[in-house]
Amino acid sequence: MASEFELSRNITIGQHVPTGSFIHRLDPRIKLLVFTILVIAIALNTSYVGNALGLLLSIYLFWASKIPVSYGLSGIKPAIPFIIILAVLQLIFQGNVFSGGKVFFEYGFILITSESIRLVIVSAVRFVEIILLSSVLTLSTSTTELTHSIQSLLSPLKKIKFPVHELSLIITIAIRFVPTFAIEMEKMMKAQASRGADFGSGEWWRIIQRTKDMLPIIIPLFNIALSRAEDLILAMESRCYTPGNDRSSYSVYRAIGRDYLVLIIGLLFSALLLFYRFPY
Amino acid sequence: MKSSLSVRNIVIAGVLGAVAILLGVTRLGYIPVPTAAGNATIMHIPAIIGGIMQGPVVGAIVGVIFGVSSFLNATVPLFKDPLVAILPRLFIGVAAWLVYVGIRRKSEYLAIGTAAFLGTLTNTVLVLTMAVVRGYMGAEVAWTVAITSGIPEAIVGTIVTLAVVLAWKQIGKGKKSKISEDL
Protein backbone atom coordinates (compact mmCIF):
# COMPACT_ATOMS: atom_id res chain seq x y z
CA MET A 1 0.00 0.00 0.00
CA ALA A 2 2.64 2.50 1.06
CA SER A 3 4.66 1.77 -2.03
CA GLU A 4 1.92 3.35 -4.14
CA PHE A 5 2.87 6.71 -2.68
CA GLU A 6 6.57 6.54 -3.43
CA LEU A 7 6.33 8.75 -6.46
CA SER A 8 9.87 10.07 -6.42
CA ARG A 9 11.20 6.58 -6.95
CA ASN A 10 9.55 6.22 -10.34
CA ILE A 11 10.96 9.42 -11.72
CA THR A 12 13.72 8.63 -14.13
CA ILE A 13 13.92 12.09 -15.62
CA GLY A 14 17.47 13.35 -15.67
CA GLN A 15 18.73 9.84 -15.13
CA HIS A 16 22.23 9.65 -16.45
CA VAL A 17 24.35 6.53 -16.82
CA PRO A 18 27.98 7.58 -17.12
CA THR A 19 29.90 4.89 -18.95
CA GLY A 20 32.44 7.19 -20.57
CA SER A 21 31.75 5.73 -24.00
CA PHE A 22 32.39 7.39 -27.33
CA ILE A 23 28.78 8.63 -27.39
CA HIS A 24 29.01 10.11 -23.91
CA ARG A 25 32.02 12.15 -24.93
CA LEU A 26 30.43 13.63 -28.03
CA ASP A 27 29.58 17.30 -28.04
CA PRO A 28 26.02 17.41 -26.60
CA ARG A 29 24.95 19.97 -29.21
CA ILE A 30 25.90 17.64 -32.04
CA LYS A 31 24.25 14.72 -30.25
CA LEU A 32 20.97 16.57 -29.85
CA LEU A 33 20.98 17.85 -33.42
CA VAL A 34 21.71 14.46 -34.94
CA PHE A 35 19.10 12.84 -32.69
CA THR A 36 16.40 15.32 -33.73
CA ILE A 37 17.11 14.91 -37.43
CA LEU A 38 17.26 11.12 -37.16
CA VAL A 39 13.94 10.92 -35.31
CA ILE A 40 12.23 13.08 -37.94
CA ALA A 41 13.74 10.99 -40.73
CA ILE A 42 12.60 7.75 -39.07
CA ALA A 43 9.13 9.14 -38.41
CA LEU A 44 8.68 10.06 -42.08
CA ASN A 45 10.07 6.85 -43.58
CA THR A 46 7.50 4.17 -44.45
CA SER A 47 9.60 1.54 -46.21
CA TYR A 48 10.69 -1.84 -44.83
CA VAL A 49 14.32 -1.46 -45.86
CA GLY A 50 14.56 2.08 -44.51
CA ASN A 51 13.20 1.06 -41.12
CA ALA A 52 15.41 -2.03 -40.99
CA LEU A 53 18.42 0.24 -41.54
CA GLY A 54 17.12 2.59 -38.84
CA LEU A 55 16.71 -0.33 -36.44
CA LEU A 56 20.25 -1.54 -37.12
CA LEU A 57 21.60 1.97 -36.55
CA SER A 58 19.72 2.44 -33.26
CA ILE A 59 20.86 -0.97 -31.98
CA TYR A 60 24.42 -0.07 -32.96
CA LEU A 61 24.23 3.29 -31.15
CA PHE A 62 22.80 1.64 -28.07
CA TRP A 63 25.61 -0.89 -28.11
CA ALA A 64 28.23 1.79 -28.73
CA SER A 65 27.03 3.83 -25.76
CA LYS A 66 27.73 0.83 -23.45
CA ILE A 67 24.48 1.44 -21.56
CA PRO A 68 23.20 -1.77 -19.90
CA VAL A 69 20.59 -3.43 -22.11
CA SER A 70 18.11 -3.55 -19.21
CA TYR A 71 17.69 0.25 -19.44
CA GLY A 72 16.61 0.05 -23.03
CA LEU A 73 14.35 -2.95 -22.46
CA SER A 74 12.65 -1.33 -19.46
CA GLY A 75 11.19 1.20 -21.89
CA ILE A 76 9.93 -1.43 -24.29
CA LYS A 77 8.64 -4.10 -21.90
CA PRO A 78 5.47 -2.39 -20.54
CA ALA A 79 4.61 -1.38 -24.10
CA ILE A 80 4.50 -4.85 -25.61
CA PRO A 81 0.80 -5.58 -24.87
CA PHE A 82 -0.17 -2.17 -26.31
CA ILE A 83 1.88 -2.78 -29.42
CA ILE A 84 0.22 -6.14 -30.00
CA ILE A 85 -3.35 -4.93 -29.37
CA LEU A 86 -2.84 -1.87 -31.53
CA ALA A 87 -1.27 -3.93 -34.29
CA VAL A 88 -4.26 -6.29 -34.33
CA LEU A 89 -6.72 -3.39 -34.35
CA GLN A 90 -4.85 -1.67 -37.14
CA LEU A 91 -4.69 -4.87 -39.12
CA ILE A 92 -8.44 -5.43 -38.84
CA PHE A 93 -9.74 -1.91 -39.37
CA GLN A 94 -7.17 -0.19 -41.54
CA GLY A 95 -7.57 -2.13 -44.75
CA ASN A 96 -10.30 0.16 -46.01
CA VAL A 97 -8.25 3.27 -45.34
CA PHE A 98 -5.00 2.05 -46.85
CA SER A 99 -6.50 -0.11 -49.50
CA GLY A 100 -3.57 0.02 -51.91
CA GLY A 101 -1.60 -3.07 -52.81
CA LYS A 102 -2.54 -6.72 -52.88
CA VAL A 103 -5.60 -7.95 -50.99
CA PHE A 104 -4.75 -10.92 -48.79
CA PHE A 105 -7.95 -11.45 -46.87
CA GLU A 106 -11.45 -10.08 -47.06
CA TYR A 107 -14.44 -10.90 -44.89
CA GLY A 108 -17.23 -8.41 -44.19
CA PHE A 109 -15.57 -5.21 -43.07
CA ILE A 110 -12.24 -6.92 -42.45
CA LEU A 111 -9.85 -6.26 -45.27
CA ILE A 112 -6.16 -7.07 -45.00
CA THR A 113 -3.96 -5.69 -47.73
CA SER A 114 -0.22 -5.51 -48.23
CA GLU A 115 -0.41 -1.78 -47.42
CA SER A 116 -2.10 -2.30 -44.06
CA ILE A 117 0.40 -5.01 -43.13
CA ARG A 118 3.18 -2.61 -44.04
CA LEU A 119 1.65 0.05 -41.80
CA VAL A 120 1.46 -2.30 -38.81
CA ILE A 121 5.01 -3.61 -39.12
CA VAL A 122 6.56 -0.24 -39.88
CA SER A 123 4.88 1.53 -36.95
CA ALA A 124 5.96 -1.20 -34.50
CA VAL A 125 9.57 -1.11 -35.73
CA ARG A 126 9.58 2.69 -35.73
CA PHE A 127 8.44 2.63 -32.12
CA VAL A 128 11.35 0.40 -31.06
CA GLU A 129 13.82 2.55 -33.00
CA ILE A 130 12.66 5.76 -31.35
CA ILE A 131 12.68 4.20 -27.86
CA LEU A 132 16.26 3.04 -28.37
CA LEU A 133 17.41 6.37 -29.80
CA SER A 134 15.75 8.49 -27.13
CA SER A 135 17.12 6.34 -24.34
CA VAL A 136 20.62 6.62 -25.80
CA LEU A 137 20.25 10.40 -25.85
CA THR A 138 18.78 10.87 -22.38
CA LEU A 139 20.93 8.26 -20.63
CA SER A 140 24.20 9.51 -22.09
CA THR A 141 23.61 13.23 -21.62
CA SER A 142 22.97 15.11 -18.39
CA THR A 143 20.04 17.53 -18.24
CA THR A 144 22.41 20.48 -17.84
CA GLU A 145 24.20 19.51 -21.03
CA LEU A 146 20.86 19.13 -22.76
CA THR A 147 19.54 22.56 -21.80
CA HIS A 148 22.85 24.21 -22.69
CA SER A 149 22.82 22.58 -26.07
CA ILE A 150 19.18 23.56 -26.72
CA GLN A 151 20.17 27.12 -25.95
CA SER A 152 23.20 27.12 -28.21
CA LEU A 153 21.44 25.29 -31.06
CA LEU A 154 18.59 27.78 -31.04
CA SER A 155 20.83 30.83 -30.65
CA PRO A 156 20.63 31.83 -34.34
CA LEU A 157 16.93 32.49 -33.68
CA LYS A 158 17.94 35.40 -31.43
CA LYS A 159 18.22 37.42 -34.64
CA ILE A 160 14.44 37.29 -35.05
CA LYS A 161 13.93 38.12 -31.35
CA PHE A 162 13.02 34.57 -30.38
CA PRO A 163 13.60 34.30 -26.60
CA VAL A 164 16.21 31.51 -26.66
CA HIS A 165 17.79 32.07 -23.27
CA GLU A 166 14.36 32.38 -21.64
CA LEU A 167 13.25 29.12 -23.22
CA SER A 168 16.23 27.25 -21.85
CA LEU A 169 15.64 28.82 -18.44
CA ILE A 170 12.02 27.61 -18.57
CA ILE A 171 13.19 24.08 -19.34
CA THR A 172 15.71 24.23 -16.49
CA ILE A 173 13.04 25.41 -14.05
CA ALA A 174 10.64 22.70 -15.22
CA ILE A 175 13.18 19.91 -14.76
CA ARG A 176 14.37 21.33 -11.46
CA PHE A 177 10.87 21.39 -9.98
CA VAL A 178 9.71 17.91 -10.97
CA PRO A 179 11.28 16.11 -7.95
CA THR A 180 10.17 18.90 -5.59
CA PHE A 181 6.57 18.58 -6.70
CA ALA A 182 6.81 14.80 -6.53
CA ILE A 183 7.71 15.08 -2.86
CA GLU A 184 4.88 17.56 -2.27
CA MET A 185 2.46 15.25 -4.01
CA GLU A 186 3.61 12.29 -1.91
CA LYS A 187 2.93 14.33 1.22
CA MET A 188 -0.54 15.26 0.00
CA MET A 189 -1.40 11.69 -0.93
CA LYS A 190 -0.28 10.45 2.47
CA ALA A 191 -2.21 13.21 4.22
CA GLN A 192 -5.36 12.40 2.27
CA ALA A 193 -4.91 8.67 2.79
CA SER A 194 -4.52 9.11 6.52
CA ARG A 195 -7.90 10.85 6.48
CA GLY A 196 -9.36 7.80 4.80
CA ALA A 197 -9.22 8.86 1.16
CA ASP A 198 -8.82 6.13 -1.37
CA PHE A 199 -6.55 6.27 -4.40
CA GLY A 200 -6.24 3.91 -7.26
CA SER A 201 -7.70 0.96 -5.40
CA GLY A 202 -11.06 1.25 -7.19
CA GLU A 203 -11.71 -1.06 -10.10
CA TRP A 204 -10.43 0.20 -13.40
CA TRP A 205 -13.81 0.33 -15.08
CA ARG A 206 -15.15 2.82 -12.53
CA ILE A 207 -13.64 5.65 -14.49
CA ILE A 208 -15.68 8.46 -12.97
CA GLN A 209 -14.90 7.31 -9.43
CA ARG A 210 -11.19 7.05 -10.14
CA THR A 211 -11.11 10.45 -11.75
CA LYS A 212 -12.93 12.01 -8.83
CA ASP A 213 -10.40 10.42 -6.48
CA MET A 214 -7.62 12.30 -8.25
CA LEU A 215 -9.13 15.77 -7.96
CA PRO A 216 -8.13 16.36 -4.28
CA ILE A 217 -4.51 15.69 -5.33
CA ILE A 218 -4.32 17.52 -8.62
CA ILE A 219 -5.94 20.81 -7.66
CA PRO A 220 -3.73 21.39 -4.58
CA LEU A 221 -0.75 20.35 -6.71
CA PHE A 222 -1.40 23.22 -9.10
CA ASN A 223 -1.91 25.62 -6.21
CA ILE A 224 1.35 24.59 -4.57
CA ALA A 225 3.09 24.95 -7.91
CA LEU A 226 1.73 28.43 -8.45
CA SER A 227 2.53 29.65 -4.96
CA ARG A 228 6.08 28.33 -5.34
CA ALA A 229 6.20 30.22 -8.60
CA GLU A 230 5.35 33.42 -6.68
CA ASP A 231 8.27 32.78 -4.32
CA LEU A 232 10.64 32.19 -7.19
CA ILE A 233 9.48 35.32 -9.02
CA LEU A 234 10.13 37.36 -5.91
CA ALA A 235 13.55 35.79 -5.44
CA MET A 236 14.58 36.39 -9.03
CA GLU A 237 13.33 39.95 -9.15
CA SER A 238 14.99 40.89 -5.88
CA ARG A 239 18.27 39.68 -7.41
CA CYS A 240 17.60 41.93 -10.40
CA TYR A 241 17.26 39.14 -12.93
CA THR A 242 16.50 40.80 -16.27
CA PRO A 243 15.27 38.65 -19.13
CA GLY A 244 16.83 39.28 -22.48
CA ASN A 245 20.29 40.38 -21.36
CA ASP A 246 23.36 38.74 -22.80
CA ARG A 247 25.02 36.20 -20.54
CA SER A 248 28.25 34.30 -20.63
CA SER A 249 28.32 30.72 -19.47
CA TYR A 250 30.56 28.67 -17.22
CA SER A 251 31.09 25.75 -19.56
CA VAL A 252 31.83 26.31 -23.23
CA TYR A 253 31.46 23.44 -25.68
CA ARG A 254 33.95 23.04 -28.45
CA ALA A 255 33.23 20.64 -31.28
CA ILE A 256 36.25 18.70 -32.57
CA GLY A 257 36.86 16.48 -35.60
CA ARG A 258 34.95 13.40 -34.47
CA ASP A 259 31.89 15.51 -33.64
CA TYR A 260 31.78 16.84 -37.19
CA LEU A 261 32.30 13.32 -38.50
CA VAL A 262 29.28 12.09 -36.50
CA LEU A 263 27.25 15.07 -37.70
CA ILE A 264 28.06 14.34 -41.34
CA ILE A 265 27.29 10.63 -41.00
CA GLY A 266 24.03 11.39 -39.20
CA LEU A 267 22.97 13.89 -41.87
CA LEU A 268 23.83 11.51 -44.70
CA PHE A 269 21.92 8.68 -43.04
CA SER A 270 18.85 10.88 -42.47
CA ALA A 271 19.00 12.13 -46.05
CA LEU A 272 19.10 8.52 -47.21
CA LEU A 273 15.98 7.70 -45.15
CA LEU A 274 14.18 10.84 -46.25
CA PHE A 275 14.91 11.07 -49.96
CA TYR A 276 15.97 7.68 -51.29
CA ARG A 277 13.08 5.63 -52.70
CA PHE A 278 13.56 2.19 -51.18
CA PRO A 279 12.24 -0.63 -53.36
CA TYR A 280 10.42 -2.35 -50.45
CA MET B 1 16.74 44.83 -26.32
CA LYS B 2 13.57 44.27 -24.39
CA SER B 3 12.44 40.71 -24.34
CA SER B 4 8.84 39.68 -24.81
CA LEU B 5 8.90 37.40 -21.77
CA SER B 6 8.87 38.75 -18.22
CA VAL B 7 10.27 36.96 -15.17
CA ARG B 8 6.70 36.08 -14.28
CA ASN B 9 6.09 34.47 -17.68
CA ILE B 10 9.31 32.47 -17.48
CA VAL B 11 8.75 31.15 -13.97
CA ILE B 12 5.10 30.24 -14.43
CA ALA B 13 5.81 28.48 -17.72
CA GLY B 14 8.61 26.52 -16.03
CA VAL B 15 6.51 25.54 -13.04
CA LEU B 16 3.51 24.47 -15.14
CA GLY B 17 5.86 22.53 -17.38
CA ALA B 18 7.11 20.72 -14.28
CA VAL B 19 3.53 19.80 -13.35
CA ALA B 20 2.91 18.47 -16.87
CA ILE B 21 6.08 16.33 -16.74
CA LEU B 22 5.20 15.10 -13.23
CA LEU B 23 1.66 14.06 -14.21
CA GLY B 24 3.19 12.14 -17.10
CA VAL B 25 5.96 10.28 -15.31
CA THR B 26 3.80 9.29 -12.33
CA ARG B 27 0.98 8.16 -14.66
CA LEU B 28 -1.39 10.30 -12.55
CA GLY B 29 -2.17 12.30 -15.67
CA TYR B 30 -3.82 9.36 -17.36
CA ILE B 31 -7.46 8.45 -16.98
CA PRO B 32 -7.70 4.77 -17.84
CA VAL B 33 -10.29 4.72 -20.61
CA PRO B 34 -10.04 1.59 -22.72
CA THR B 35 -9.63 2.97 -26.25
CA ALA B 36 -7.25 2.53 -29.15
CA ALA B 37 -5.27 5.55 -28.04
CA GLY B 38 -4.57 3.90 -24.67
CA ASN B 39 -5.70 6.50 -22.18
CA ALA B 40 -7.48 9.77 -21.80
CA THR B 41 -5.18 12.44 -20.44
CA ILE B 42 -5.31 15.46 -18.18
CA MET B 43 -1.71 16.49 -18.86
CA HIS B 44 -2.82 19.19 -21.26
CA ILE B 45 -4.38 21.16 -18.38
CA PRO B 46 -1.12 22.98 -17.46
CA ALA B 47 -0.95 24.26 -21.04
CA ILE B 48 -4.51 25.60 -20.82
CA ILE B 49 -3.84 27.23 -17.45
CA GLY B 50 -0.64 28.76 -18.82
CA GLY B 51 -2.54 30.15 -21.78
CA ILE B 52 -5.31 31.63 -19.65
CA MET B 53 -3.02 33.10 -17.00
CA GLN B 54 -0.04 34.33 -18.99
CA GLY B 55 -1.04 34.51 -22.63
CA PRO B 56 -0.40 32.52 -25.79
CA VAL B 57 3.41 32.36 -25.67
CA VAL B 58 3.46 30.71 -22.25
CA GLY B 59 0.59 28.43 -23.30
CA ALA B 60 2.51 27.30 -26.38
CA ILE B 61 5.74 26.72 -24.43
CA VAL B 62 4.00 24.63 -21.76
CA GLY B 63 2.31 22.74 -24.60
CA VAL B 64 5.68 21.93 -26.14
CA ILE B 65 7.05 20.73 -22.79
CA PHE B 66 3.98 18.50 -22.42
CA GLY B 67 4.42 17.24 -25.97
CA VAL B 68 8.10 16.41 -25.57
CA SER B 69 7.53 14.67 -22.25
CA SER B 70 4.64 12.64 -23.65
CA PHE B 71 6.85 11.79 -26.63
CA LEU B 72 9.68 10.56 -24.39
CA ASN B 73 7.38 8.66 -22.00
CA ALA B 74 5.09 7.16 -24.59
CA THR B 75 4.26 3.48 -24.39
CA VAL B 76 2.21 3.36 -27.59
CA PRO B 77 3.66 3.78 -31.09
CA LEU B 78 1.16 6.55 -31.80
CA PHE B 79 2.85 8.95 -29.38
CA LYS B 80 6.36 7.93 -30.34
CA ASP B 81 5.76 9.92 -33.50
CA PRO B 82 6.87 13.53 -32.97
CA LEU B 83 4.33 14.78 -35.51
CA VAL B 84 1.50 13.42 -33.36
CA ALA B 85 2.99 13.93 -29.91
CA ILE B 86 4.57 17.38 -30.17
CA LEU B 87 3.19 19.45 -33.02
CA PRO B 88 -0.54 19.53 -32.11
CA ARG B 89 0.25 20.40 -28.49
CA LEU B 90 1.57 23.81 -29.49
CA PHE B 91 -1.95 25.02 -30.13
CA ILE B 92 -3.71 23.99 -26.89
CA GLY B 93 -2.66 27.02 -24.87
CA VAL B 94 -3.06 29.38 -27.81
CA ALA B 95 -6.64 28.25 -28.47
CA ALA B 96 -7.52 28.47 -24.76
CA TRP B 97 -6.11 32.01 -24.62
CA LEU B 98 -8.05 33.14 -27.68
CA VAL B 99 -11.33 31.82 -26.27
CA TYR B 100 -10.64 33.26 -22.83
CA VAL B 101 -9.85 36.73 -24.18
CA GLY B 102 -12.89 36.62 -26.44
CA ILE B 103 -15.42 35.86 -23.69
CA ARG B 104 -13.74 37.49 -20.69
CA ARG B 105 -15.74 40.71 -21.02
CA LYS B 106 -19.04 38.88 -20.55
CA SER B 107 -18.24 36.59 -17.64
CA GLU B 108 -14.97 35.52 -16.07
CA TYR B 109 -16.30 32.09 -15.00
CA LEU B 110 -17.84 31.34 -18.36
CA ALA B 111 -14.65 32.44 -20.10
CA ILE B 112 -12.39 30.15 -18.05
CA GLY B 113 -14.75 27.20 -18.38
CA THR B 114 -15.22 27.57 -22.12
CA ALA B 115 -11.51 28.15 -22.67
CA ALA B 116 -10.70 24.93 -20.82
CA PHE B 117 -13.37 22.97 -22.69
CA LEU B 118 -12.34 24.20 -26.13
CA GLY B 119 -8.63 23.97 -25.28
CA THR B 120 -9.11 20.29 -24.49
CA LEU B 121 -11.07 19.76 -27.68
CA THR B 122 -8.23 21.42 -29.61
CA ASN B 123 -5.88 18.81 -28.21
CA THR B 124 -8.24 15.91 -28.97
CA VAL B 125 -9.12 17.04 -32.47
CA LEU B 126 -5.60 17.96 -33.60
CA VAL B 127 -3.97 14.83 -32.15
CA LEU B 128 -6.57 12.54 -33.69
CA THR B 129 -6.38 14.36 -37.02
CA MET B 130 -2.62 13.89 -37.06
CA ALA B 131 -3.10 10.24 -36.07
CA VAL B 132 -5.45 9.69 -39.00
CA VAL B 133 -3.22 11.62 -41.39
CA ARG B 134 -0.17 9.64 -40.30
CA GLY B 135 -2.12 6.40 -40.67
CA TYR B 136 -2.16 5.12 -37.07
CA MET B 137 -5.94 4.78 -37.06
CA GLY B 138 -8.87 5.01 -39.41
CA ALA B 139 -11.45 7.77 -39.27
CA GLU B 140 -14.05 5.52 -37.55
CA VAL B 141 -11.63 4.54 -34.80
CA ALA B 142 -10.70 8.19 -34.37
CA TRP B 143 -14.35 9.14 -33.87
CA THR B 144 -14.75 6.46 -31.20
CA VAL B 145 -11.67 7.73 -29.40
CA ALA B 146 -12.91 11.31 -29.68
CA ILE B 147 -16.14 10.37 -27.96
CA THR B 148 -14.87 7.90 -25.36
CA SER B 149 -11.81 9.83 -24.24
CA GLY B 150 -12.29 13.33 -25.62
CA ILE B 151 -15.49 14.06 -23.71
CA PRO B 152 -14.30 12.85 -20.26
CA GLU B 153 -11.08 14.79 -20.87
CA ALA B 154 -13.00 17.95 -21.65
CA ILE B 155 -15.18 17.62 -18.54
CA VAL B 156 -12.30 16.89 -16.16
CA GLY B 157 -10.25 19.63 -17.83
CA THR B 158 -12.99 22.19 -17.28
CA ILE B 159 -13.43 21.28 -13.61
CA VAL B 160 -9.72 21.32 -12.78
CA THR B 161 -8.98 24.51 -14.73
CA LEU B 162 -11.86 26.39 -13.12
CA ALA B 163 -10.79 25.29 -9.64
CA VAL B 164 -7.13 26.14 -10.19
CA VAL B 165 -7.52 29.46 -11.97
CA LEU B 166 -10.14 30.76 -9.53
CA ALA B 167 -8.01 29.70 -6.57
CA TRP B 168 -5.01 31.36 -8.18
CA LYS B 169 -6.90 34.60 -8.58
CA GLN B 170 -7.34 34.50 -4.81
CA ILE B 171 -3.64 33.76 -4.30
CA GLY B 172 -2.87 36.46 -6.81
CA LYS B 173 -4.53 39.09 -4.64
CA GLY B 174 -1.79 38.64 -2.07
CA LYS B 175 0.86 38.55 -4.77
CA LYS B 176 4.29 38.78 -3.21
CA SER B 177 6.10 40.58 -5.97
CA LYS B 178 4.79 44.12 -6.34
CA ILE B 179 6.84 45.05 -9.37
CA SER B 180 6.49 42.14 -11.76
CA GLU B 181 3.62 43.76 -13.65
CA ASP B 182 5.68 46.93 -14.20
CA LEU B 183 8.78 45.25 -15.58
Image (cartoon, coloured by chain):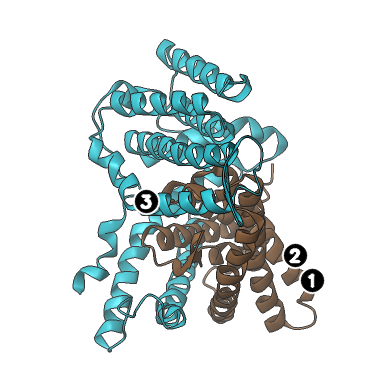
Q: Write down which chain is painted brown.
A: B
What residue did someone put label 1 on? Answer: B102
Q: Colour of chain A?
A: cyan
Q: Amino acid at mark 3?
A: Ala
Whether residue A80 is visible, yes or no, is yes
Hey, which residue is sitting farthest left in the picture? A2
In the figure, A240 relative to B1: above or below?
A: below
Asked if disc 2 and disc 1 are in contact, CB closer than 8 Å, the reply is yes
Give the residue drawn at x 37%, y 75%.
A204
Hey, which residue is sitting farthest bottom in the picture? A195
Residue B168 lies, in percent from the top left, at 55, 76
Give the residue drawn at x 55%, y 24%.
A280
Q: Quadrant of residue B143?
A: bottom right
Q: Quadrant of residue A245?
A: top right
Q: Amino acid at mark 1?
A: Gly
Separation of residues labelled 3 and 2 (CA atoms): 37 Å
Residue A45 lies, in percent from the top left, at 57, 31
Considering depth in this image, is B84 or B38 the residue closer to the camera? B38
Asked if residue A103 lies left or right of residue B15, the reply is right
- Element type at marker 1? helix
Tell me which chain the residue with mark 2 is part of.
B
Asked if residue B12 lies left or right of residue A56, the reply is right
Which mark lies nearer to you, 3 or 1?
3
Tell me which chain the residue with mark 3 is part of.
A
- Element type at marker 3? helix
What residue did someone put label 3 on? Answer: A79
What residue did someone put label 2 on? Answer: B98
Circle 1 residues within 10 Å: few <14, some 14–19, many ≥20: few
